[in-house]
Amino acid sequence: MTKSWPEIIERYREYAGDWRSIHALQSLARRINETPLAGALFAWTSMFDLCIVQTAVSYPYEGPFLRLSPASRDQVQFRYEDTHVEAHQWHRTVDADDVMPRLLEFLDQLRWFPAAVLESLGSKKIG
C-alpha cells in the first residue's frame, strides 16, 4: 500500500490544475524525499490526500496515520486518524505555504523524531 516518495511525487506532478494546496503537497513530498525523513516516513495517496505513517504498511490498514488533504485552493488540512470518531481526531488547517512547518510541528508533538533532527530541517524552505 505504501509507495516510494518518487512515486508519490510523480502522482502530484501529474496534476495540471492551479490549486496551491495540491502543489504544496507535491513540494512537501519532494522535500521529504530530499531529507532523512524519506527513510523513516512511509506514505500513500488517496485521490489528492497524502497519508503518512511511521512504518511500511499493506492493505487493509486500520492503524493510525496522518492525512494531509487539500481543504481548499489555498489550504491544507492535517488530520491524525487514530480513532474512528472524527470529533476526537487532532486536526489543523494551514495555508499552503505553511505545510512543511506544520508537518515538523506535528512530528515534534508526537515525538516521531528527535528534536535535533527536526530543527535541522526547519530552517530549510520547501519548493
Image: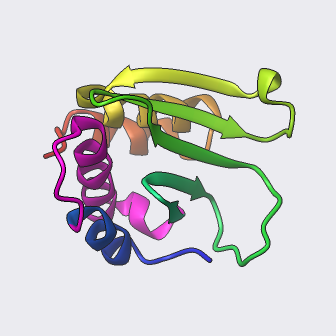
Residue 22 lies, in percent from the top left, at 30, 46
Prevalent SS, magenta region = helix
Q: Residue at x 37, y 69 (%)?
A: 8
Of residues 49 and 64, the one nearer the viewer is 49
24 lies left or right of 52: left
- Describe residue 64's horizontal placement relative to residue 99 as left or right: right
| Rendered residue at 49%/76% (across/down) | 3
Stretch in magenta = 14-42
Asked if the magenta segment contains residue 17, the reply would be yes
Residue 109: x and y in percent read 60, 28
Instruction: Please say if 17 is above or below 110.
Output: below
Report which quarter residue 122 is drawn in: top left
> Which of the colour schemes (rainbow, by chain, secondary structure, one colour) is used?
rainbow
Q: Is 64 left, or right, of 114 in this rendering?
A: right
Classify 107 as above or below 62: above
List x then y, in percent, for residue 13.
21, 65
Can residue 59 be found in the magenta stretch? Answer: no
Q: Quadrant of the N terminus?
A: bottom right
Residue at the spot x=19%, y=43% of the render? Answer: 126
Count of marks placed on residues: 0
Q: Is residue 113 above or below residue 26?
A: above
Query: In the rendered image of this protein, does residue 59 appear above or below residue 41?
Result: below
Q: Residue at x 23, y 28 (%)?
A: 97
Looking at this view, name the residue that lies furthest to the front.
Answer: 17
Q: Nearer the viewer, residue 52 or 108?
A: 52
